[in-house]
Image: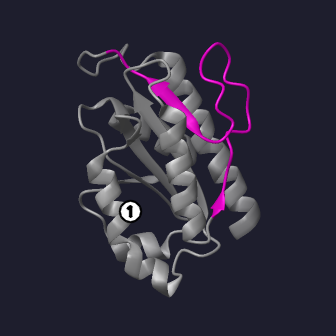
Amino acid sequence: MKIIVVYHSGFGHTEKQAQAVAKGAGAELMKATEPDWDKLNAADAIIFGSPTYMGSAAAEFKKFMDESSKIWFEQKWKNKIAGGFTNGAGMSGDKLNTIKQLTIFAGQHGMIWVSAGFVPGDRFGCGLGNMAQSENAPADENNPPKIDLENAEKYGKRIAEITTKFRG
């Protein structure tokens, strides 16, 4: 089973979240600015991650999405498992819009989206994917908060479990 976490991180916060998701999923990390399309096409599951900037996915991640149009046309990701996560400085920061954007992107590719599937405790109640909040400060051992990284790891584990059920 092959899972790839493809992400963009402008300041390191979303990269820490991507690492936690990948740890839970047993996945390979890939930067959205350096995509290996052959590896992505061969993966059983792809997990998308982008910071939320101005209520939307980062421009660098959107470029990755746009560059996947030939893959979309050939339906190379159809029936792959998908999931997504985002990080932003604001407690809301319109992060749900980014999760929806990633969900629609996966749907356009004919992918099967995996919801969060767990109660996130005292943090974000996003059933559609995984959210984290980072302070407007350097990424470090407390930024993003430990609970957000634990939830990211749980989400990665759930995607791995669902991928195993669907893909074997």
Relative horizontal placement of residue 59, taking residue 144 as reference (left or right): left
Q: How many marks?
A: 1
Q: Position of residue 47 (x, y in %)?
A: 51, 53
Chief SS of the magenta region? loop
Q: Give coordinates of residue 139: x percent, y percent.
A: 28, 22
- The residue sitting at 50% across, 50% down in the picture is 101
User: Which residue in the protein does label 1 denote?
Assistant: 65
As for residue 95 lying within the magenta part, the answer is no
Kind of residue at badge 1: Met
Seen as rendered, the residue at the extreme bottom is 74
Q: Secondary structure at mark 1?
A: helix
Reply above or below: 166 against 26: below
| Picture coordinates of residue 158, whole percent (x, y) | 67, 44
Q: Position of residue 51 (x, y in %)?
A: 37, 37
Instruction: Name the residue nearer the viewer: 43 or 112.
Output: 112
Magenta part of the protein: which range?
112-135
